[in-house]
Image (cartoon, rainbow, N blue to C red):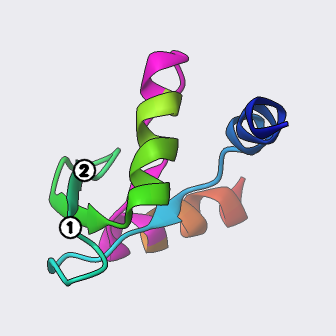
């Protein structure tokens, strides 16, 4: 059942916010899908990141600045 959930999660790919500072919980480094800035996520989010890249999908993570820009562009159409 986990595979099905992962597939569904990957199909509904929305930009995911990630922290720009490493914490005890967010220790896995990923890159912003737009500007390649270093971001840090928890283990579950890192697994999502890995599955997305292996599946050939775009990087789902966005830094705060790029997420706002992405939202503005999506709103404008």
Look at discs 2 and 1 and give the one toward the viewer: 1
Q: Which residue is mark 1?
A: 27
Would you say residue 42 sits in the magenta stretch?
no
The image position of residue 56, as x and y in percent, is 51, 16
Real-space Cα distance between discs 2 and 1? 10 Å
Q: Report whether 27 appears left or right of 67.
A: left
The local crowd at label 1, few if under 14, some if 14 to 19, many if 20 or more residues have their Cα within 10 Å, is some
Q: Report whether 50 appears left or right of 7.
A: left
**Residue at screen point 76% across, 34% down:** 11
- SS of the residue under disc 1: loop
The local crowd at label 2, few if under 14, some if 14 to 19, many if 20 or more residues have their Cα within 10 Å, is many
Quick one: 26 or 55, which is closer to the camera?
Answer: 26
* Image position of 34 with respect to 8: above or below: below
Q: Report whether 37 appears left or right of 53.
A: left
* Image position of 4 with respect to 46: above or below: above
Quick one: 64 or 46, which is closer to the camera?
Answer: 46
Q: Which residue is mark 2?
A: 30
Magenta part of the chain: 53-67
Quick one: 35 or 7, which is closer to the camera?
Answer: 7
The image position of residue 38, as x and y in percent, is 14, 58
- SS of the residue under disc 2: strand
**Residue at screen point 15% across, 80% down:** 21
């Amino acid at each position: 059942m986990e595979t099905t959930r992962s597939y569904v999660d990957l199909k509904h790919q929305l930009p995911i916010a990630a922290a720009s500072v490493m914490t005890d919980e967010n220790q896995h480094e990923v890159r912003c899908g737009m500007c390649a800035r270093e971001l840090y996520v928890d283990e579950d989010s890192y697994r999502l990141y890995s599955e997305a890249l292996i599946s050939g999908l775009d990087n789902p993570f966005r830094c705060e600045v790029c997420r706002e820009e992405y939202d503005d562009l999506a709103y404008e159409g």
